[in-house]
Image (tube, helix red, strand yellow):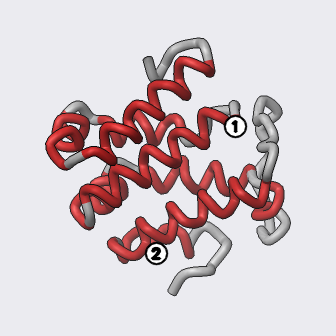
Amino acid sequence: EMGHLSPDVRARAAHLVAGVASTGFMGLKVLLRSGIITKLAAMLCDPIADVRDAVISALRNCGIRGGDPVWTQMVKADVMTTLLAALFQQPLIRGALPAPPAINSAWQAHHDPVEEATQLLDLLWSIAESSQDAVKRFNSSGLALLH
């Protein structure tokens, strides 16, 4: 359902993952074996704000419940590429970039841009706490906030 045409279905699928991940490690293990991190990573750049919110929540819950191995798996699954792309679509972040990338015309503005930027940065911070590679990747992106 993560690739469904309906944004409501995509958001519901991500919320389901967030719920399963938060309930226990056994459910999370099944999700991880199914490649859920890669599927969620692709959805971080969904043009619909509600889908992005659900995906951020799902990734955060997976990492919190699974700990360092899951945060590391996120880096290996290249979550950083889509996380940075999502961050750089954020109006608050774009203003801090020396040369921001082109704006995705399909990108739906979030009803609370501060909240979305905060959630994206929180996810970034959580990944970076477990992975020096994530810190290096972020710092090489042109917005060096992490050391």
Instruction: Label 1, secondary structure: give it.
Output: helix
Q: Residue 49 has which mark?
A: 1
Instruction: Label 2, secondary structure: give it.
Output: helix
Name the residue at 55% across, 53% down.
83
- Which residue sits furthest front? 23
In the rendered image, the vertical position of residue 80 relative to residue 34, given as above or below = below
Q: Residue 123 has which mark?
A: none
User: Is 117 displayed left or right of 69 in the figure?
Assistant: right
Q: Quadrant of residue 108?
A: top right
How much space separates mark 1 and mark 2, taking CA atoms? 28 Å
Looking at the image, is mark 1 or mark 2 earlier in the sequence? Answer: 1
Residue nearer the viewer, 111 or 105: 111
Residue nearer the viewer, 111 or 124: 111
Amino acid type of the residue that numbered disc 2 sits on in the rendered structure = Lys
Q: Quadrant of residue 5?
A: top right
State the count of labels: 2
Name the residue at 38% across, 39% down.
19
In the rendered image, the vertical position of residue 66 relative to residue 97, given as above or below = above
Amino acid type of the residue that numbered disc 1 sits on in the rendered structure = Ala
Residue 37 at x, y percent in the picture: 35, 42
Categorize mark 1 by other alpha carbons within 10 Å: few (<14), some (14-19), many (20+).
many
Residue 100 at x, y percent in the picture: 78, 59
Q: Residue 136 has which mark?
A: 2
Categorize mark 2 by other alpha carbons within 10 Å: few (<14), some (14-19), many (20+).
some
